[in-house]
Amino acid sequence: MQSGLRKFAKMEEVAEENGGGGQGVVALLRWAAGMGISDLMPSSSGRVGPSSPTSSSCLGHSLFVSHFPDAGGRGLAAARDLRKGELILRVPKSSLLTTDSAMDDKKLAYCIERHRHRLSSTQMLVVVLLAEVGKGRRSRWYPYLVQLPRSYNTLANFTSFEIHALQVEDAIWVSEKAITIAKSDWKEAVSLMQELDFKPQLLTFRSWLWASATISSRTLHIPWDSAGCLCPVGDLFNYAAPDEDYCPENSESVQEITSLRNQPLDHSTHDLQLDNANQSDFSMQRLTDGGYEETMSSYCFYARKGYKKGEQVLLGYGTYTNLELLEHYGFLLNENPNDKAFIELKAEICASSSWPRDSLYLQPDGSPSFALLCALRLWATPTNLRKSVATRIYSGSLVSVENEVLIMKWLSKHCHDILGKLKTTVGEDNMLLGMIDQMIDFPSCPKSAVDIPQENEFREFFQAHGLTEEGTDQVQLTMKTRRHLERWKLAIQWRLAYKKMLQSCVFYCENIVCCLNA
Ligand SMILES: C[S@@+](CC[C@H](N)C(=O)[O-])C[C@H]1O[C@@H](n2cnc3c(N)ncnc32)[C@H](O)[C@@H]1O
């Protein structure tokens, strides 16, 4: 194995070993202290001092690294009681890994410049990250790079089996598109990577997928580069959906929150995120709990709420549906207040109003979005009367009891029919999830596990991963199989949440019909 490849493989091994503690994290925190990353409280002047050069860790005053098995794995916990709005972590600009910061390397700078006109900023950051990985110990960010996750569960990493386990056409389409985009981004960047003399392993699509998932799931917004930055230690915060009541006006640090986070990805290639980018200034501010601050020349993080000592400190990366979380971050939330279920709609319904298609969805409680409700009310109104009731409808009022009963009955039946066409039921999915958990928790699983009603899907999984050898009573789970199980589980969790929204919609509509009839 060539030395660069050996380093990469070694880094992968080390990263694999570092679930939430371990030598890698200790080394990271020691290195971070040397770089001036600090969780020290502000002094009376309001400024945060750099870590002492003798300090062996950049953390311990406000935060510490811990493991949260049910909420993101490795993450940051409060080292003391934290007040809402308090500055809890400061990461100096010099330690951020950005396309610009890698420009000390003359060859890299020259080649990047030559390709700047034809590659997106995200593609360039992916190349910069791979270039740093290729340097091994010579990289300034080596202690940071070695503790990055070895693999990711973002949609672009899903196999065909895992994608089809999503069951819903829209979600399958989004996943296939994610892979297609990743492939074309990689192909476009290969010539640059060859010019940079990347080792063969770093030129592969697999390495590209790893690096682009690192960028997608870990970068933070900076004002000078739409690709964002990799922020050592700052990227250890796990995610919580932004709270309804979180608002800087209520925060003690309203003066301090000066910069707004936005989405970490290149919007030109990820149109799903435009939704978020287009939100009003107010709602963007509502999501802010960190940002780059010019006056401090640092990325600064604030407590979005009060935390008790030991509690996990979370960051709101933005408002995402579960499919978006899965696409860009490789996880989803069982309770996601921002989730949406898009259902197939007749062309006449979409055309009945001027609402964009992506505003027509079901909400987590099963109720139709405002736009969907308006579109249905208009669609169920005779064409010659639509103009006269439009204002009434757009103000959120019913057209008539008959109109409302008609659309609720239609929506309820439609959801019922969609659920009937999906391959498995909510109950079956729950049972599958139980079986998968059992397989993940126990390193070997009895082969009789496949003797369950959802036998087919289990058999397909076993077949897709070459686990069907005759005469084997115990199926040993390799690391790779575990990863496939985790992704399959995510796909089932996603479709289950989707089905539950449709089921809730059926109850919601039946309830409305009942009330109106009464
Ligand atoms: C910025 S990193 C956070 C630190 C990460 N846990 C680590 O060990 O490096 C974002 C990744 O953490 C995981 N994550 C963050 N929040 C999560 C949550 N609420 N539930 C599950 N996984 C989460 C996802 O894998 C996501 O891609």
Image (spheres, helix red, strand yellow):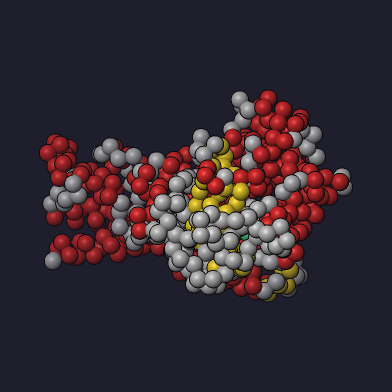
Q: Residue 11 is drawn in which quadrant?
A: bottom right
x then y, percent, for residue 421: 42, 56
Q: What residue is at 50 percent from the left and 52 percent from the top? A: 290
Quarter of the C terminus within the rendering: bottom left
Q: Choose between 414 and 282: the one closer to the eye.
A: 282
| 109 left or right, relative to 349 | right
Q: Choose between 62 and 182: the one closer to the eye.
A: 62
- Residue 168 visible at all: no
Q: Which image quarter has ligand 1?
A: bottom right
Labels in figure, total: 0
Above or below for 212 versus 500: above
Above or below for 374 versus 313: above
Q: What residue is at 54 percent from the left and 47 percent from the top? A: 296
x then y, percent, for residue 502: 37, 59
Q: What residue is at 49 percent from the left and 67 percent from the top? A: 82
Check the image and name the residue furthest to the front: 45
| 7 left or right, relative to 156 | right
- Residue 107 visible at all: yes
Q: Choose between 207 and 410: the one closer to the eye.
A: 207
Q: What residue is at 53 percent from the left and 59 percent from the top? A: 42
| 180 left or right, relative to 263 | right
x then y, percent, for residue 341: 39, 53
x then y, percent, for residue 293: 51, 46
Q: Choose between 289 and 114: the one closer to the eye.
A: 289
